[in-house]
Image (cartoon, grey):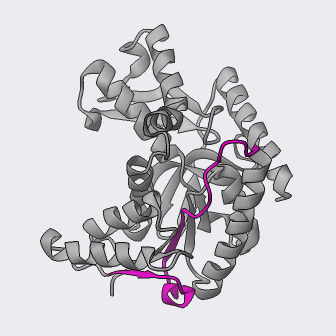
Amino acid sequence: MRKKVTVVGSGNVGATAAHWMAAKELCDVVLIDIIEGVPQGKGLDLLEAMPIEKRDSSVVGTNDYADTANSDIVVITAGIPRKPGMSRDDLLNTNYKIMSDVVGKAVQYSPNCILIIVSNPLDAMAQAAYKLSGFSRNRVIGMAGVLDSARFRTFIAQELKVSVENVTAFVLGGHGDTMVPLSRYSTVAGIPITELIEPTKLEQLVQRTRDGGAEIVKYLKTGSAYYAPSSAVTEMVEAILKDKKKILPCAAYLEGEYGINGLYVGVPCKLGSAGIEEIIQIKLTVDEQAALQKSADSVKELVSVIGV
C-alpha cells in the first residue's frame, strides 16, 4: 500500500508540492483547501497527468478532512501572505488562527502523522503547530533550511560555473533576514567555498541568499516563490517516507542544542521514518554562534506575540 500525504492549502506552494510528489510517485496525495472546487480541480488535473508521466499515484482534491484520514505526513502550506498596510503582528495572529484550525483537524484524523510546516512566518508557525498538536518534537518539522540552502547552492554554482550537484551548502537559523549561511561548511566537490570564492564576493552571495524570497517577490509583484519551496518540502517528504536518514537543515524544536532552549530554529537534522531522528550539533565559531543566537532571538519575539 502506498504512503499517504495530505497537503493543506491548494495555492501555488501546496499544488506544486502535490505535483512534485505525485510525479515522483512517492505517495498518494490529498490536496485540501477551504475554497470549494479549487483543490478538486487541481487534484483532478494532476491525476489526469499521471498516465502521461507513467505514475500510479492517486491525487484527490477535497474540502473535507475526513478524506485526509490516516495520512503518514501532513504538509501545511495554508496561511495568508502579508498585505500592504498589514503589520507583522496582524499577519502572525491571522496565520496562528488558521494554524489552530488546520492542526486541530489534521491531528484529529491523522493522530500518528508527521507534520511539516511551510506556512509563514515559518519558525513561529512551526512552534505553534508543535504546541497545538501535542506531538513529540521529532514529528513537527519546519521547512526552511532546505530552501535557503538550495538558493545558496544555486548562487555558488553560478558564480563558479560548476554543476549544482557538486555544491553542498548549509544555512542555519530562522527563515528570514537573520538566517545564517555557513560558508565554512559549504563545499564544491569537497573543497570549502572559502578556498574558491573571495570574501567580498562570498558575502554578496550570502546576502543574496538572505534576500532570496524578496528577490522573487520583487519580480512577481503579486506573489511569492513556489517552485523551489515546494521542491524543498518534497525532498523532506521523500527522506521520511523512504527512511533515508538524510541530513537536511530543518526548523526543529531545540531543547538545549546550540545553547538554545524552547524554540524552533533551523539546524542540521537527520530525517527518517520517525521524522527528526537526530539533531546534528556542529562546532560553530564565536561569530557563527552569535549570529545563530540573534536569529533565535528574532524567533522568540514572534512566538511571544502569539503566546506559544
Residue 80 among those drawn in magenta:
yes
> Where is 72 relative to 222, above or below?
below
x, y percent for residue 276: 56, 61
- Between 272 and 28, the one lying in front of the other is 28
Left or right relative to 227: residue 251: right
Q: How many marks?
A: 0
View extreme (bottom): residue: 66
Which residue is painted at 44% across and 40% down in the image?
220
Q: Which residues are magenta?
A: 59-87
x, y percent for residue 30: 43, 79
Left or right relative to 275: residue 286: right
Screen quadrant of the N terminus: bottom left
Left or right relative to 227: residue 144: right
Q: Tell me if I can see residue 245 in this picture.
A: no
Residue 38 among those drawn in magenta:
no
> Where is 203 relative to 148, above or below?
above
Which residue is painted at 38% across and 60% down in the image?
16
x, y percent for residue 209: 49, 30
Residue 66, by quadrant, is: bottom right
> Where is 294 relative to 83, above or below?
above
Which residue is painted at 32% across and 19% down in the image?
159
Q: Tell me if I can see residue 42 in this picture.
A: yes
x, y percent for residue 180: 59, 31
Which residue is painted at 33% across and 82% down in the image?
2
Screen quadrant of the C terminus: bottom right
- Between 153 and 103, the one lying in front of the other is 103
Residue 31, by quadrant, is: bottom left
